[in-house]
């Protein structure tokens, strides 16, 4: 597939607010990206016209019930069939922040045994409590399974901002040890919060900004085609989005977030 | 028949409850001998079903499908007949 033929669908519902930045990131890289309201996708039955799907950040449906829960169940009810086909054909799905919460609530992530009927993980209220908006460091943990980070060497430290109040990744207490092992066995761990030098946060605030179990910031499904993360790559796309750009002598043209979009496009060019 | 459902969703024991902890801290500041606060959410649902059993079944289904995440939440359902 040629770069200019790639069509990315960025979904929108009431409360999403990172759709425009996400579209711009894709467009900057020369692919077609469209922000589409979910009602339009249902009306036109058009989901399968796209090669990749993005659930962008925001506060869909006012974060009612639990962040991401309503959008997730809505998707399953109205577009469940298409979504299943999308996944089975290994078309990539990205969930950023609220999008990650949606992917967990739909049962697409971690998705140990395919799409799970009930969520197998949760993104719970931050610890310490409250909305937290700050730049964090992420260590890339994936061995090559995740198609969204294939251009990033293992162990590389990236910088991106987080902005959420429900981002504490967790498993059910009684299963957490076993499920963490499964994440490692399947190469599903993608990003962990770390210090600037790459040392893991080990739960210390604010390096780990939300109290996430095992400093987990992003995971993928066992196939590596569905990826969710709390930090915002689209807000770390250009150099001038970085907080200290006025203090730098020289900065590259792009920020670390670009690597995620580039990796995805690379995968699409190669695979389809 | 119309049934009034009271569905309470709360965190499973042992899970941290940042909202409860913050509230407890403030109540202590206000001079109360508060040991612990747990925050839960209550949904009041008015539901039309044929039988009480069906109402119970539907309520259970609602919790599993939407209102609770089994990773961290417990739920309790109380059913009253609408007068």
Image (cartoon, grey):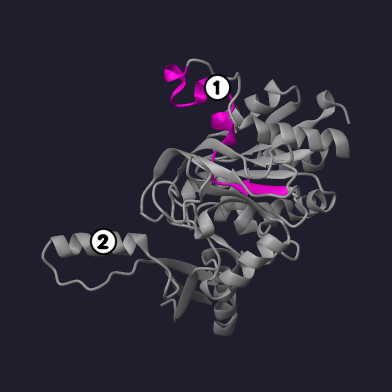
Would you say A86 lies left or right of B74 here?
A: right
User: What span is colored magenta in the figure?
Assistant: A226-248
What residue sits right under mark 1 in the picture?
Answer: A239
Question: Which secondary structure lies at badge 2?
Answer: helix
Residue at the extreme left: B31
Determine the CA span between mark 1 and mark 2: 41 Å
Check residue B23 in the rendering and tell me which mark sits there, or answer none: 2
**Residue A267 sits above or below residue A230 on the image:** above
Where residue A45 sits in the image (x, y, percent)?
A: 78, 43
| Chain to which the residue tagged by mark 2 belongs | B
Residue found 54% across the figure and 61% down from its top = A122
Number of callouts = 2
Left or right: A270 in relation to B37: right
Crowdedness of circle 1 by 10 Å Cα count: few (<14), some, many (20+)? Answer: some
Q: Residue at x 51, y 60 (%)?
A: A213
Residue A77 pos. (x, y %): 68, 57
């Amino acid at each position: 597939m040629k770069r200019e033929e790639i069509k990315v669908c960025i979904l929108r519902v009431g409360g999403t607010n990172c759709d425009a930045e996400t579209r711009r990131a894709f467009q900057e890289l020369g692919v077609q990206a469209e922000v589409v309201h979910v009602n339009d996708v249902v009306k036109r039955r058009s989901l399968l016209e796209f090669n990749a799907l993005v659930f962008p950040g925001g506060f869909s449906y006012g974060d009612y019930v639990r962040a991401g829960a309503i959008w997730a169940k809505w998707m399953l009810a109205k577009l469940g069939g298409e979504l299943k086909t999308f996944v089975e054909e290994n078309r990539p799905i990205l969930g950023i922040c609220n999008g990650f919460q949606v992917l967990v609530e739909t049962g697409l992530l971690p998705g140990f045994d395919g799409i799970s009927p009930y969520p197998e993980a949760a993104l719970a209220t931050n610890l310490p409590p409250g909305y937290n908006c700050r730049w964090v460091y992420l260590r890339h943990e994936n061995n090559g399974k995740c198609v969204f980070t294939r251009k990033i060497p293992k162990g590389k430290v990236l910088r991106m901002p987080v902005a959420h109040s429900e981002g504490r990744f967790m498993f059910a207490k009684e299963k957490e040890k076993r499920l963490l092992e499964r994440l490692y066995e399947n190469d599903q761990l993608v990003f962990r919060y770390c210090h600037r030098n790459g040392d893991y946060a080990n739960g210390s605030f604010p390096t780990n900004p939300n109290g996430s179990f095992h400093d987990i910031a992003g995971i993928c499904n066992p196939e590596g085609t569905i990826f969710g993360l709390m930090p915002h790559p689209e807000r770390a796309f250009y150099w001038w989005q970085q907080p200290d750009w006025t203090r730098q002598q020289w900065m590259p043209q792009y920020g670390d977030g670009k690597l995620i979009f580039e990796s995805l496009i690379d995968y699409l060019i190669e695979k389809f | 028949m119309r049934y009034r459902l009271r569905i309470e969703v709360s965190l499973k024991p042992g899970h941290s409850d940042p909202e409860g902890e913050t509230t407890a801290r403030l109540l202590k500041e206000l001079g109360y001998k508060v040991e612990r606060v747990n925050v839960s959410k209550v949904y009041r649902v008015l539901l039309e079903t044929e039988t009480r059993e069906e109402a119970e079944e539907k309520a259970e289904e609602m919790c599993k499908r939407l209102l609770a995440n089994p990773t961290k939440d417990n739920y309790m359902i109380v059913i009253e007949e609408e007068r």
